[in-house]
Image (cartoon, rainbow, N blue to C red):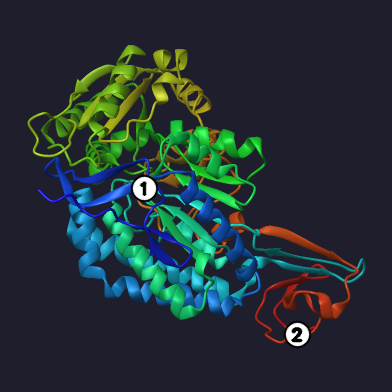
Amino acid sequence: MTTPTLQPILLDGAWRQADAPTDRFHAFNPSTRATIDEHAYPVSGWADLDALLDAGHAAATAMSQLPGETLAGFLEGYADAIEARADALVEAAHRETGLPAEPRLRNVELPRTTGQLRQAARAARDGGWRRATIDTATGIRSIHAPLGGPVVVFGPNNFPYAFNGIAGGDFAAAIAAGNPVIAKAHPAHPRTSVLLAEAALEAAQAAGLPPGAVQMFFRTGGELGLRLVSDPRVGAVAFTGGRPGGMKLKAAADAVGKPIYLEMSSVNPVFVLPGALRERGEALAAELHGSCAMGAGQFCTKPGVTVLQAGDEAERFVEQLQRLTAEAKPGVLLSPHAPRDIASTVAALQSAGAELLAGGAIAEDAQGFAFQPTVLRVSGERFLADPEALQSEAFGHVNLVVMADSAGQVLEVAKAMEGNLTGTIYSDTGGSDDAAYDALAPILRTRVGRLLNDKMPTGVAVSAAMNHGGPFPATGHPGFTAVGVPASLIRFSALHSYDNVRPHRLPLALQDRNPTGTLMRLVDGEWTTRDV
């Protein structure tokens, strides 16, 4: 068999062969466990990363002078180029991830991705996200501006388009805020990332962006990754993935004061109050099961812990959930190591006192990478004795039911929750749970980024009001979101203040006669869009 040609990296506006790669790798087809050997991808050494950083840093200077209209033109052109490649992208991502071509990839995730790019384009063109603020009494003015260095984006394995390092929400936000991007392609879908990068390069050249505005490499050694995120030329880092890797990157970036925004781990607790159990417990068990099964449980917002108050209705709920889980077929997991990782987490939950009710083993007889749908149970008392171990995230179709012995213990369980992306409370429609809700919600509110009522957390709407973030360890900072324009852009900006600077030397948006008249500006304590 002919050895496949090594895929070049995207460096400084062109596809270039990696400089003395340390190794090469292939993608897998997770539905068949077969290696996809038509393409090989390089493991870059420091020479590649150094060149990417030099080009990105040079591009940052040029991009800081570009008008929002130019950035918007690139983002919209990129969305168009992605749509023109839809067939090839769907074929590649389906093969590399096992995710359904339709509706998931073609009809849901691809439109979401192009929609995010176009939302970011509108924000770049409008400029209101920059929060221009003018205080005429003191002569001080401020505005959010680009960082002055490239944003390094690490995307996850579970969203090959919408969170891809070269196309997803972090990419769109960083570009719209005026920063270059150095993207690390995820090894689970490298061919998909190449197709996206080709579209990005085409759009960047058409829009007149500097050569280093959009760059991509495939993989590097762990120590070099840490060196990359702590390099002085980096403006900021965005990471979506598992906690172990995220924490190492965070430590390296924090040590040198580099901003790093991470989405790492979340069990997304679901509290089902007694009235809701009496009213519609069986239906809620089915709803929970469906949410856990979505995407084989490989969603960062998958409910991993369910909290009930003991009683006959709670027992019936658990029986229904156990039956549905035992009857469910394993979904396809995204990588060869995923079944082993889930098995390790389930074993750790059992060691911490959880009882296995269904599943719990690698699905060896499945055609692809798979783990049996799994549900476990633990008492509220045992959970409170070791809450850290019993909140371990299993990135698959796994749910732990915590059975509290009283309403008071439900609140204690909530207090023991780590920071999460989401927290959900199900309550009855007749009002019998209102007092319990009022006691629980303030506790849960401080531990989650998004609080839901009577709705599973799995979906993440691309809305300006969305918070896809939360307290540590779900993320690295509770004040920022990875989804939602314009708020997501603020992460990749620096606050620039001007004191007594002559009017003609100010950025256009801070000048008293703003000819565009489109920016929302805070002038002497009042927001305005008018010329002043």
**Rounded to the nearest whole Å, what is the CA distance between mark 1 and mark 2?**
44 Å
| Crowd rating for badge 2 (residues with CA inside 10 Å; few <14, some 14–19, many 20+) | some
- Quarter that holds the C terminus: bottom right
Q: Position of residue 262 (x, y in %)?
A: 51, 43
Given residues 415 and 474, the one toward you in this image is: 474
Residue at coordinates 60% horizontally, 63% vertically from top-left?
58
How many other residues sit within 10 Å of disc 1, few (<14), some (14-19) or many (≥20)?
some
The secondary element bearing badge 1 is classed as loop
Left or right, 296 with respect to 455, comes to: left
Task: Identify which residue, 331 or 65, lies in the foreground.
Answer: 65
User: Outermost residue, front direction?
Assistant: 20
Choose between 237 and 401: the one closer to the eye: 237
Q: Is residue 440 visible?
A: no
Residue 39 screen position, x and y as percent: 22, 53
What residue sits 56% from the left and 37% below the top?
A: 250
Q: Residue at x 13, y 30 (%)?
A: 363
Residue 219 in the image: above or below residue 178: above
* Mark identifier at residue 531: 2
Q: Is residue 174 above or below residue 327?
A: below
Q: Nearer the viewer, residue 521 or 248?
A: 248
Give the residue number, with chain letter if any, for mark 1. 455
Secondary-structure class at tag 2: loop
| Residue type beneath disc 2 | Asp
Image position, residue 412 (x, y; %): 50, 22
Residue type at numbered disc 1: Lys
Residue 182 vertical placement versus 295 (above, below): below
Q: Is residue 73 visible?
A: yes
Circle nearer the viewer, 1 or 2 = 2
Name the spot of residue 291 as percent of width and height, x first: 28, 43
